[in-house]
Image (spheres, coloured by chain):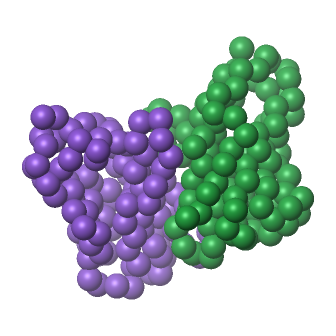
Amino acid sequence: DVKVTQSSRYLVKRTGEKVFLECVQDMDHENMFWYRQDPGLGLRLIYFSYDVKMKEKGDIPEGYSVSREKKERFSLILESASTNQTSMYLCASSLGVAEQYFGPGTRLTVT
Amino acid sequence: AQTVTQSQPEMSVQEAETVTLSCTYDTSESDYYLFWYKQPPSRQMILVIRQEAYKQQNATENRFSVNFQKAAKSFSLKISDSQLGDAAMYFCAYFTGTASKLTFGTGTRLQVTL
């Protein structure tokens, strides 16, 4: 079974802090994705990556950056966290057009 | 831009009954994929069912089936013999190679009652 893990289930950070969210998949998938999930808005794509060191902006990249130094790991970075970035963050991976496999999510609260 | 609309924020169904969740989408593409994902409370999102646009036959997975109406751009999910474990948030999603990303609807929260 594909396993996608995220570094934390719950995270509380202060405004202005630099925040790292890490995601690891164990199925050698080329594609990895970061979403944020907010009530009434569904899932919105922040960034995605089709290969190591490659990244593409999604629908809401402002305030975020990503890093993919190894195929299995995809990190989301909040350079200076703000309260409007309080949300659930979901990581996913996929192979080609096949379905995406999701991690358990990180609920981030910025105070 | 592609959009996916789920017009039912919440639905309720009694155990053992059938429920249909609706989804419509907007696209100018002819080749694409549609998905239904399930997110149980505090658990990981998992794929329920997948439909390729070029296939006329509706996809089925055990108690889950879809009604895919390509001309109407409609993709509803039918859950038969509902079980307590079906209670979850359900998301409809659209994928096309042109955009190379999934576009999700806003979700429908399904409650299953005894």
Q: Is residue A46 visible?
A: no
Residue B74 spot, x, y in % from top left: 29, 65
Location of residue B80 (image quadrant): bottom left
Residue A30 lies left or right of residue B54; in this view the side is right
Query: Which quadrant holds the C terminus of chain B?
Result: top left
Residue A14 lies left or right of residue A100; in this view the side is right
Residue A53 spot, x, y in % from top left: 88, 63
Relative height, residue A103 to residue A1 (above, below):
above
Observer-nearest residue: A74 or A87?
A74
Residue A91 spot, x, y in % from top left: 65, 50
Residue at the spot x=30%, y=64% of the render? B75
Q: Is residue A42 visible?
A: yes
Query: Which quadrant holds the N terminus of chain B?
Result: bottom right
Which residue sits furthest front? A1
Observer-nearest residue: A49 or B1?
A49
In the rendered structure, the colour chosen for chain A is: green
Residue at the spot x=27%, y=54% of the render? B22
Observer-nearest residue: B106 or A53?
A53
Relative height, residue B111 to residue B60 (above, below):
above
Residue B25 spot, x, y in % from top left: 39, 61
In the rendered structure, the colour chosen for chain B is: purple
Residue at the spot x=60%, y=49% of the render? A103
Total numbered badges shown on the rendered structure: 0
Residue at the spot x=57%, y=53% of the render? A102
